[in-house]
Image: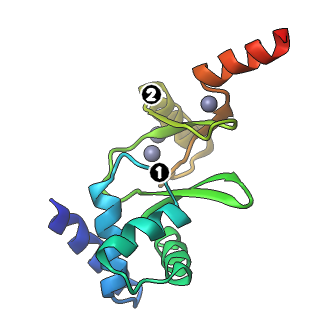
Amino acid sequence: MNREIINKVSNKLSENNYKMTSQRRDILKVLIENDSKHFSAEELYNAVKEINPNVGLATIYRSLELLNGLGIVQELDFDHNYRRYELSMDDEHHHHLICVKCEKIIEFNDLVLEGFEAKLEKEYRFKIIDHQIKFYGFCQDCQRDNAKQKTK
Ligand SMILES: [Zn+2]
Ligand SMILES: [Zn+2]
Ligand SMILES: [Zn+2]
């Protein structure tokens, strides 16, 4: 399974004239092994460092930018200086609820949204190849905290 994804990514890289370097492979390994996690660049750096002590943070940033550009990794923006990443290739299609207070990410999928895509395609005669849906707000815990603070 891991090998399958690595092969897919290798193909995608070579299609775009990039090589699967050992550092890119290590990054992918970490992302594949933690496929329910949404890493910040620093968290990813720390995890990759455990299997490859020679990796640098600048390499992680550059690799993420490349992998994101090729659609291999998906970037989730919190704000300008806080981003999280996850593998988007071969991963189950899903959307995100992002808590702006504690930065918790909840994944969901809703078939109604996929039906909406089909409707858009028909209505605008537009061939949709991908979509990302993110909702920002407060998770249940943070709503409780907010309510507590208000009564103080
Ligand atoms: Zn929260
Ligand atoms: Zn996700
Ligand atoms: Zn969707």
Q: Is residue 38 visible?
A: yes
Name the residue: 51% across, 52% down. Answer: 127
The quadrant in which the C terminus is found is top right
- Numbered mark located on residue 38 in the image: 1
Name the residue: 47% across, 70% down. Answer: 45
> What is the crowding at mark 1: few (fewer than 14 residues within 10 Å), some, or many (at least 20)?
many
Relative to 12, residue 14 above or below: below
Camera-nearest residue between 93 and 141: 141
Name the residue: 55% across, 47% down. Answer: 132
Hey, what amino acid is under mark 2? Answer: Asp
Name the residue: 37% across, 81% down. Answer: 53
Camera-nearest residue between 138 and 75: 138
What residue does disc 2 label?
Answer: 110
Q: Secondary structure at mark 2?
A: loop
Whether the residue under disc 2 has CB within 8 Å of ligand 3: yes
Quadrant housing residue 21:
bottom left
- Numbered mark located on residue 124 in the image: none
Camera-nearest residue between 65 and 59: 59
